[in-house]
Structure formats: C-alpha cells, structure tokens
Image (tube, helix red, strand yellow):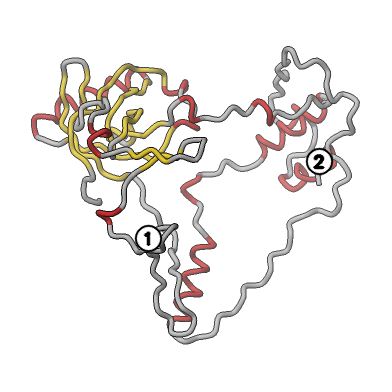
Amino acid sequence: MPRPVWSGAITFGLVTIAVKVVPATEGHGIAFHQYHRTDMARVRVKKVCSIDGETLSADQIGRGFETPDGDTVEITDDELDALPLPAAKAIEIAGFVPAASVDPLRIGEGYYLESGAETAAKPYVLLRRALERTAKVAVARFAWHGRERLGLLRVKDDVLVLHAMKWPDEIRSPKELVPDEVPLDEREVAAAVSLVEAMPATDPSSFTDAYREALERVIAAKADGAETVAPPEREPETGGEVLDLMSALEQSLERTGAGTGGSEGGATVHELPRRSGRGSRGTGKRRASGS
C-alpha cells in the first residue's frame, strides 16, 4: 500500500475521526519521453518569455488570469490564501443521501481512508456501519491543493473511501445529444432485451490491458536487441452484411444460441417509456441501420 498523501479528520456531527488518505488506484500506463533522434538525448522543456525569449526561473513566474478582453490579471499567493476554504485538515460531512441517487458522472478518483489513530477506530467503524445499514453515502466538503472540493464517502470492503466529486455546474447537459424519436416495434424491443439477457455476465475485474501488455513485449524485445514482429491483424467479427437493425439482432441472438422468440427466451419485455413534449419527430425516417 502506498504512503498516505494527506492526513486530517472526518467531522461527523460532534464526532471527529482521525484519518489518513491513501490512493486507492494506480496507473499502469507506459510513459514515453521525447528524445533527439541524432544522439538519443532527452529533450527538455524550458519556460521562456513569449516577448523577449528569456528563459525564466521559478521566482520570475507569477500566476495570472486572462480576461475575455485579452488583459492579464495577476493573482498573488496572499490573495488566494485570503479566500474562504473549509478547514485545511477536515473532511466535513454535510449530509447523507441514498447511494443510488448520485450520478456516476460526478464521482471522481477514489482514496482509501485509514484510521489515523487508535482512538479513531471506534468512531471509524461506527460511521462505516451506519452507512452500510442505511445504504447511504456521505456528502462532504474539504480543501485539497488550495481548492474547495466536494466529496463523497462510501464503504468498500469494510474501508471508508473518499471520492472527489464534480460540482453540479461541471456536468454538461446531454439534452442536445438525444436522438430524434424513431419508430420501434415490440418485436425489435423483445429481440434487444433477449440479446441483453442472453449475453454472459461479465466481471470487469477479469479484463486485462492487452495493448499495454503487447507494448511491454515490444519494449522488452527492442531493449534486448531483438527485432519486433507485428501481431497478425484480427479478423473483424462480422456475420456478413447486415441489412437492417432486426437482422443484426437476429444474427447476434443466433450466436448466443438464444433464438429470437421474444419473451420465450426468458427475457422480460418492459414497456418503453413515453417522452413528453417531443411530438413525433423522426417518425417518417428510415429504420436505423445496424451497420
């Protein structure tokens, strides 16, 4: 387990729980460097003034905001320090909501919360059990890297987890992306539901990053002076030309061995929800192609 990146306390009413914040995830991506092809030396990035071309040191660089008019307004460290922030070392729980009510789009990177002191063990377990028994998550405010953050506290494998959350105005509205209404009949809906229920349940933890593994093999081979061999191209998994959506559903169901018998294949067909205020746009359009 990596070292804690932050330590402080959860405030829960009048209860204080000392905690240490530990990263819950780790990246395994392969990072590349830029290099000079002639001598394989690393290419460095310098901070240069765009007017006089002077290379600048850290103490010569300030922080500024460019206005819509193109002017730059300098913001000093003292001005940032004077802004209101939650207590620097506190995760202040503001309330509790049902776990299912939180939009996953708002949930960011997760951190494990470790009990930070022997006396914190009992209130830590108390909060954990309260969350488990109520099936709720805690919404909290905290300060991180000089900014106020909104957070979500939940339970995973008997450990409290803190997620940074997006503020409501950081989530773009998808309304303009909603397709126009298209005609669907119950036969198509039944086939789609049958396909969903016929395909195997997939555990996300069973997946591996095949691209990264292949790249690691290429790097290892080149480091040993061996020539790399390109992997064979994968044949596209198609069943021939698909003429329409229903054909695509039927061919997909045949591959699963489920057939297209609607609810006879064990699928439950649900009524499509009706949208209000959209009229009947798109009812004269051609049926969507499955290609």
Q: CA distance from mark 1 to mark 2?
A: 59 Å
The reply, left or right, for residue 79 in relation to residue 258 is left
> Hey, which residue is sitting farthest left in the picture?
119
Residue for point 51% across, 35% down:
68
Q: Is residue 49 visible?
A: yes
Residue for point 86% across, 41% down:
244
Q: Nearer the viewer, residue 64 or 93?
A: 64
Read off the residue under disc 1. 47
Q: Nearer the viewer, residue 193 or 225?
A: 225
Residue type of the residue flagged with mark 2: Glu
- The quarter of the displayed image where residue 240 is located: bottom right
Read off the residue under disc 2. 250
The reply, left or right, for residue 244 in relation to residue 165 is right
Residue type of the residue flagged with mark 1: Lys
In the image, residue 252 above or below residue 39? above
- The quarter of the displayed image where residue 42 is located: bottom left
Q: Position of residue 253 (x, y in %)?
A: 75, 42
- CB atoms of marks 1 and 2 within 8 Å: no
Residue for point 74% across, 12% down:
277
Q: Nearer the viewer, residue 135 or 103?
A: 103
Residue for point 71% across, 37% down:
195
- The quarter of the displayed image where residue 289 is located: top right
Q: Earlier in the sequence, mark 1 or mark 2?
A: 1
Q: Position of residue 61 (x, y in %)?
A: 31, 52
